[in-house]
Amino acid sequence: MASFKIVVTGPFNSGKTEFIKTSSEIPVVSTEQRITTEDRGIKEETTVAMDFGRMTLDGDLLYLYGTPGQARFDFMREILSEGMNGLIVLVDSADKPSFPDAAELISLFSGFVTVPYLVVANKSDLEGAARLDEVRRGTKVSAQVTVMPCNATQKSSVRQVLLQMVKLLKEENPTP
C-alpha cells in the first residue's frame, strides 16, 4: 500500500471543493467562508485556506488537498505544494475565459516542484462545455499531458480521475 499527497487546484469556481467532497471517505475539512467580494453573485461560499479529504483507492491511500481559487488566497498554494506527489488541475470546461488562469496555475505549481499532473475538464456534461482539445489549447499543455473529462458531483467520474493520477504516480516511481 502506497500513500500519496495530491493537490487539487484550479481557477475560482472550477469544482475543487466538490471534487474532494465527492471522493473523500472521511468528513471533509473545509475552510469555506461566505464570499464578500464581487464574486458573491457566482456562488455563496469560497475556500479561504484549503479543503482536505482522504480516500483509499485499490489499497492506496490518497490525501487530497484543495487549494483556494481566488487570487487573494494564493499564498496557500505554495504551502500546500510542500511534499505533494501529484497535481490535479480542475478546469470549468463551461467557462472558457478561465482557461488562461488554469495555465498560470500549472506554471506556478511547476515552479514549486516537478510532479505528475492531470488537467481535468470538470463540468464537461454541461451544455456549451469545451471539448478536450479546446481545454488542452486553452491551458497550453503539451500532448504528453493527460486531459480528461469529469463531473465532480459523480463518484464514478472522480474515481476515474484519481485512478489515472495513481497510475501516473506509479509510472513515475515504480516500486522495485
Image (cartoon, rainbow, N blue to C red):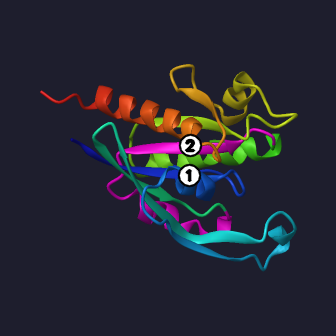
Report which residue position mark 2 lands on: 155
Report which residue position mark 1 lands on: 22
Q: Quadrant of residue 164?
A: top left
Residue 145 lies, with reference to residue 94, above or below; the image says above
Q: Amino acid at mark 1?
A: Thr
How many callouts does the rendering have?
A: 2
Residue 57 percent coordinates (x, y): 36, 41
The answer to if 71 sits in the magenta stretch is: yes
Q: Quadrant of residue 157?
A: top right
Under tag 2, what secondary structure?
A: helix
The label shown at residue 74 is: none
Residue 22 lies, with reference to residue 32, above or below; the image says above
Residue at (57% x, 19% y) in the render: 143
Residue at (37% x, 35% y) in the render: 166
Residue 10 percent coordinates (x, y): 62, 50
Q: Quadrant of residue 138?
A: top right
Q: Marks 2/1: CA distance?
A: 6 Å
Residue at (46% x, 52% y) in the render: 7
Residue at (65% x, 47% y) in the render: 153
Mark earlier in primary sequence (2, 1): 1
